[in-house]
Image (cartoon, rainbow, N blue to C red):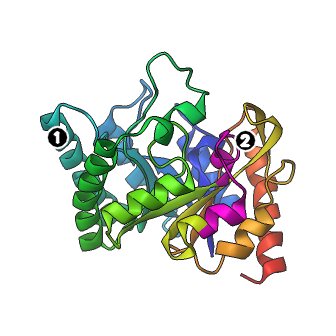
């Protein structure tokens, strides 16, 4: 099992050199970056050149990317353009970075009048049949290109997306029916949803065979809608149990530690890797 570092440990203008250094110094196997760059210091072309430069500097570090295509938009010409753009990026990632798994999203879903943090009302909580139909059609197009390139597409269990909770993920996978498309299990997102579940139910519902990737994080839970993200060792999620279930079966062979909270991400990257190294030794994975 390989361990990647999520970009959000040390993200922003001028930080990418140090991000790769942090991953290298702490024994990470790779980094999950974003496919679209959004800060003002670089345009997208410059960002991709920078990624190639750093990949050449650290050739042993593998790279994955998180990205989205809003398959559910009513402007179908725009959906096609966005899909084509993503397919081009997939090919770029494979050729230039050797990418083998991509974190993926099918378009944000927030109910009109609802707050973003009303997770149970958004995402699959507001989904209609057409959302599944359009997402499945788009995922089959992306899946075909991914299969051609030898890349896996992993839908993150993320609130305010169709694929937020295990039952919705299972339905979407069933309607998509593509071997290149599976799930990125992120329990940190599932447990903060009022309709969420524990890890055992999540893995059983999705199916170990369809978990292609995973994000490890932790949260301190006060109530379902009152929580705080924290380091792996400190919260209410049992990451040891997660790895005992999927550590040897995760399809890509990769998990990524994520730091979705404020504070010193540099030292957090060090401490979180120490935690994962211990778990790998404890579980012999």
- Figure quadrant of the C terminus: bottom right
Residue 187 place in picture, x, y as percent: 66, 53
Residue nearest the observer in this picture, 188 or 133: 133
Q: Name the residue under label 1.
A: 81
Residue 12 visible in rendering: no
Residue 139 place in picture, x, y as percent: 29, 56
Q: Residues within 10 Å of mark 1 (few under 14, many from 20)?
A: few
Earlier-in-chain disc, 1 versus 2: 1
Left or right: 185 in relation to 268: left
Q: Is residue 185 magenta?
A: no
Query: Residue 1: which disc?
Result: none
Stretch in magenta? 187-204
Left or right: 89 in relation to 261: left
Residue nearest the observer in this picture, 208 or 98: 208
| Residue pictured at 59% horizontal, 61% vertical | 214
- The kind of secondary structure element at disc 2 is helix
Q: Distance between the residues labelled 1 and 2?
A: 36 Å
| Residue pictured at 66% horizontal, 43% vertical | 9
Residue 149 visible in rendering: yes
- Figure quadrant of the N terminus: bottom right
Classify 86 as above or below 260. Answer: below
Residue found at the very far left of the displayed protein: 77
Classify 15 as above or below 19. Answer: above
Q: Does the magenta stretch include residue 200?
A: yes
Q: Name the residue under label 2.
A: 265
| Residue pictured at 80% horizontal, 71% vertical | 279
- The kind of secondary structure element at disc 1 is helix
């Amino acid at each position: 099992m390989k361990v990647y570092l999520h970009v959000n440990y040390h993200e922003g203008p001028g930080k990418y050199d140090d991000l790769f250094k942090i991953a290298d110094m702490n024994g990470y196997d790779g980094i999950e970056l974003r496919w679209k760059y959004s800060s003002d210091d670089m345009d997208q072309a410059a960002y991709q050149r920078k990624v190639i430069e750093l990949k050449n500097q650290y050739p042993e570090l593998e790279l994955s990317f998180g990205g989205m295509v809003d398959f559910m938009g009513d402007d179908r010409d725009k959906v096609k353009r966005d899909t084509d753009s993503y397919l081009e990026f997939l090919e770029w990632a494979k050729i230039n970075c050797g990418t083998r798994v991509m974190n993926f999203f099918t378009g944000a879903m927030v109910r009109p009048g609802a707050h973003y943090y009303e997770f149970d009302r958004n995402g699959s909580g507001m989904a209609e049949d057409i959302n599944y139909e359009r997402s499945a059609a788009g995922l089959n197009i992306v899946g075909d290109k991914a299969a051609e390139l030898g890349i896996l597409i992993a839908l993150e269990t993320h609130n305010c997306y169709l694929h937020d909770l295990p039952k919705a993920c299972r339905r979407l996978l069933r309607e998509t029916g593509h071997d290149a498309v599976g799930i990125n299990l992120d329990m940190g997102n599932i447990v903060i949803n009022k309709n969420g579940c524990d890890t055992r139910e999540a893995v059983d519902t999705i199916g170990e065979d369809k978990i292609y990737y995973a994000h490890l994080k932790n949260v301190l839970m006060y109530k379902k809608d009152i929580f705080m993200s924290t380091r792996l060792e400190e919260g209410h999620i049992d990451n040891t149990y997660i790895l005992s279930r999927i550590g040897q079966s995760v399809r890509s062979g990769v998990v990524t530690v994520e730091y979705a909270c404020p504070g010193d991400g540099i030292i957090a990257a060090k401490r979180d890797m120490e935690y994962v190294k211990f778990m790998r030794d404890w579980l012999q994975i």
